[in-house]
Image (cartoon, helix red, strand yellow):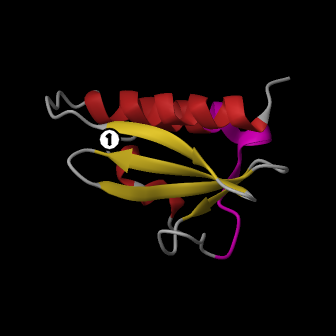
Amino acid sequence: MKQVAELTLDLCDILRKNYYKNGSTLDYNFVVEPGRKYLKIVMVNNQKSVHAFVDKKTGDLYKAATWSAPAKGVRFNLLSDIEKLRKMGETTNAMWASGYLYR
């Protein structure tokens, strides 16, 4: 079974592929910045913005509320929902823009 850090990198890859799926030529990347409690998924172009937070212990995925804090309420769990997210990345046009994290 994959660990939370590996699944977070998998999610970054899903988001990257989803972004380029629509034929964009802009250089856009998703990177992981480790913190004390969360792994922060950051979208990087000519500037940085937070895409989401992942709890290091549980794999819970949260929408970002601010640069340094997640919003309340778990949106997905990477340990149990990675395949659902992978399929969503293949079918949803703008998953990379974090719309899938809104309720």
Percent x, y of residue 25: 13, 29
Q: Is residue 39 magenta?
A: no
The part of the chain drawn in magenta is 72-84
Percent x, y of residue 66: 48, 74
The vertical placement of 35 against 87, above or below, is below
Could you tell whether 17 is left or right of 20 in the image?
right
Residue shown at 25%/44% (left/top)? 45
Could you tell whether 16 is left or right of 100 in the image?
left
Helix, strand or loop at mark 1: loop
Residue shown at 53%/56% (left/top)? 52
Between 45 and 99, the residue placed more toward the observer is: 45
In the current view of this chain or complex, which residue is farthest to the top? 1
Percent x, y of residue 31: 47, 39
The vertical placement of 60 against 25, above or below, is below
For the C terminus, the image quarter is bottom right
Percent x, y of residue 3: 80, 31
Residue shown at 60%/74% (left/top)? 71
Between 60 and 102, the residue placed more toward the observer is: 60
Q: Which residue is mark 1?
A: 93
Mark 1 nearby-residue class (10 Å; few <14, some 14–19, many ≥20): some
| Residue 44, quarter of the rendered image | top left
The vertical placement of 15 against 99, above or below, is above
Under mark 1, the amino acid is Asn
